[in-house]
């Protein structure tokens, strides 16, 4: 196709309405904590922090940083915490002290943690006690001046604090009985940070607030530099879409996804906080028994999840018996939402799932299905202030309804990658690696990941399309499709299947099912049956691991 034949198109969201009083994340935090002072802000494992209590604890942590740690503005603090009340206290306190937060997955291996700490040049780390063994291996190679340790019940009142902390040390033995030499307990830091005047330091505008590492499943992780302005803009963009469905100061949001993931941080710790919502952290969402028991005790009006979690919950009889009468907002992100899963969720809960789309590099929200205007199978419309286009392999912009790589521009786009020659931006556009179609009705549809596209006998096969068909078969609970090398056709299509509980999935039946709905070249040539599929910490299927598994058989 020549340049003359290409009709480029850009899809734009509505203008973004900015707020002059929100120059930084701290402005948002301060306003919310004053406005909703006596309302619950965050809960976890039966304990709750009100907005005024959260503000006070964050200020104490900031004071410890400023007056006792010696850490200067701009230094990096790694935060290695699961979904606990300590997370917002530490993060907002660190930002108030002018530090840059390095969100770190607490499930990282020592090698993964070491790479991140070395690359970010962290001066200090706040870490969950259960992960201390991993940190000690890292400290053999990385000099970390400040180590602050927190235990599971540190922000619970007595006697719950003793029950949780002593139980983790002496009963389950998940936490060490002693902290490493030179480490400081978070409770001690908060005690030292007591004061009568608020800490004045912070950052704003283009100052980097968070280093959010990405790319861990596809290559060496890189730190996306997200500024105060990026995160505030994305909070406002999210609010302009979801604001009509959210009653300020009244909602209770279930937050099971990792809070160190930018999706949960922006939705719960930014948008939810600014809206006066009560966010309920689920400390261990993989414990579905405990998860459902929490839901039974805690009335909720909104649920933030992803496809894997929705699919797992709707299979459970105890979940189906819950009271969903107050649930009016279900939002999916982090990975593609399967239509079959969305339909099952709505049948069980009565709440339609609004699918959105984002990237770490965009803080993260790019598109959302508006409440009341849901288009199942799409990722919605671009949020306010956002421009989208699709490009071909030569970097040429394509027309509407034409598949190409989705590219994003807007105020939420990162400042670039930390200490990388390639900042990840091309003429201001961030390239997503996702193949998308910009529809004429203003909605966007993801076809597939660029790197996951299968080419068989010269034809393009998008795994999501095949998975969608498989997931609608009554015997299929979960499915993943990959391409593996084939000397005759380039790549052949292989499907990995997890059967529904009590059902028998048959390869011949599934192949026949696919032939009814797909062109022949898209039908999997091979079916592999598994008890579960490998997934990342946020629930994305690790297709590379499945490809490697097949390749290793040769």
Image (spheres, rainbow, N blue to C red):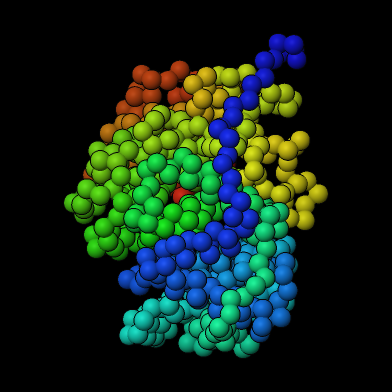
Residue sitting farthest toward the left: 321
Q: Position of residue 170 (x, y in %)?
A: 39, 86
Q: Position of residue 235 (x, y in %)?
A: 53, 49
Q: Position of residue 76 (x, y in %)?
A: 69, 68
Q: Is residue 326 above or below residue 85?
A: above
Residue occupying image coordinates x 53% and y 43% = 237
**Which is nearer the eye, 414 or 33?**
33
Q: Is residue 20 above or below residue 79?
A: above
Answer whether residue 417 is visible to the viewer in this image: yes
Residue occupying image coordinates x 66% and y 67% = 202
Residue occupying image coordinates x 35% and y 45% = 329
Residue 223 occupies which quadrant of the picture? Answer: bottom right
Q: Position of residue 107 (x, y in %)?
A: 52, 64
Q: How many numbered marks are there?
A: 0
**Which is nearer the eye, 113 or 297?**
297
Residue occupying image coordinates x 47% and y 87% = 177
Of the 4 image quadrants, the one containing the N terminus is: top right
Residue sitting farthest toward the right: 421
Residue sitting farthest toward the top: 5
Of the 4 image quadrants, the one containing the C terminus is: top right
Residue 513 occupies which quadrant of the picture? Answer: top left
> In screen coordinates, is 234 left or right of 97?
left
> In screen coordinates, is 288 left or right of 445?
left
Q: Is residue 305 above or below residue 29?
A: above
Answer whether residue 459 is visible to the viewer in this image: no
């Amino acid at each position: 196709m020549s340049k003359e034949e290409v009709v480029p198109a850009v899809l734009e969201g509505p203008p973004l309405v900015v707020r002059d009083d929100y120059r930084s994340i701290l402005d948002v935090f301060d306003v919310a904590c004053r406005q909703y002072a006596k309302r619950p802000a965050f809960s976890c494992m039966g304990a709750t922090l009100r907005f005024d209590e959260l503000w006070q604890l964050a200020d104490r942590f900031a004071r410890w940083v400023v007056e006792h740690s010696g850490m200067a503005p701009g230094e990096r603090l790694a935060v290695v915490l699961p979904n606990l009340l300590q997370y917002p206290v530490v993060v907002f306190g660190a930002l108030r002290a002018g530090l840059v937060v390095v969100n770190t997955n607490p499930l990282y291996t020592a090698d993964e943690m070491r790479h991140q700490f070395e690359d970010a040049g962290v001066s200090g780390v706040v870490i969950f006690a259960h992960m201390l063994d991993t940190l000690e291996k890292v400290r053999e190679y990385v000099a970390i001046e400040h180590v602050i340790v927190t235990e599971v019940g540190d922000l619970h009142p007595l006697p719950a604090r003793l029950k949780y902390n002593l139980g983790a040390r002496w009963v389950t033995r998940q936490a060490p009985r002693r902290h490493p030499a030179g480490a400081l307990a978070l409770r001690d830091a908060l005690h030292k940070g007591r004061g009568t005047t608020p800490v004045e330091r912070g950052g704003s505008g283009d100052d980097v607030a968070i280093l959010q590492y990405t790319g861990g499943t596809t290559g060496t992780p890189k730190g996306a530099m997200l500024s105060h302005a990026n995160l505030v803009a994305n909070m406002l963009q999210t609010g302009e879409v979801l604001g009509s469905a959210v009653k300020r100061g009244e909602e209770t949001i279930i937050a099971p996804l990792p809070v160190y993931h930018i999706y949960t941080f922006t939705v719960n710790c930014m948008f939810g906080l600014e809206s006066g919502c009560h966010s309920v952290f689920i400390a261990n969402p993989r414990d579905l028994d405990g998860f459902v028991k929490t839901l039974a005790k805690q009335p909720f009006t909104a649920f933030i999840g992803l496809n894997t979690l929705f699919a797992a919950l709707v299979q459970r009889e105890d979940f189906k018996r819950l009271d969903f009468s107050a649930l009016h907002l279900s939002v999916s992100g982090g990975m593609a939402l399967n239509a079959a899963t969305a339909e099952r969720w709505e049948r069980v809960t009565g709440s339609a799932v609004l699918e959105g789309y984002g990237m770490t590099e965009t803080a993260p929200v790019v598109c959302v299905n508006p409440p009341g205007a849901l288009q199942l199978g799409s990722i919605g419309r671009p949020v306010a202030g956002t421009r989208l286009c699709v490009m071909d392999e030569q970097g040429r912009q394509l027309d509407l309804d034409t598949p190409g790589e989705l590219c994003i521009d807007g105020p939420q786009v990162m400042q670039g990658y930390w200490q990388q020659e390639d900042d990840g931006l091309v003429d201001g556009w961030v390239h997503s690696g996702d193949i998308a179609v910009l529809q004429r009705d203003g909605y966007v549809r993801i076809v597939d990941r660029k790197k996951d596209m299968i080419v068989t006998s010269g034809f393009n096969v998008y795994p999501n399309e095949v998975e969608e068909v498989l997931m609608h078969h009554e015997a299929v609970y979960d499915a993943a499709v990959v391409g593996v090398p084939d000397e005759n056709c380039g790549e052949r299509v292989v499907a990995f299947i997890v059967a529904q509980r009590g059902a028998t999935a048959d390869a011949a039946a599934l192949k026949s099912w696919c032939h009814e709905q797909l062109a022949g070249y898209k039908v999997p040539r091979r079916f592999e049956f598994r008890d579960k599929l490998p997934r990342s910490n946020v629930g994305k299927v690790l297709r590379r691991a499945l490809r490697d598994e097949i390749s290793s058989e040769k």
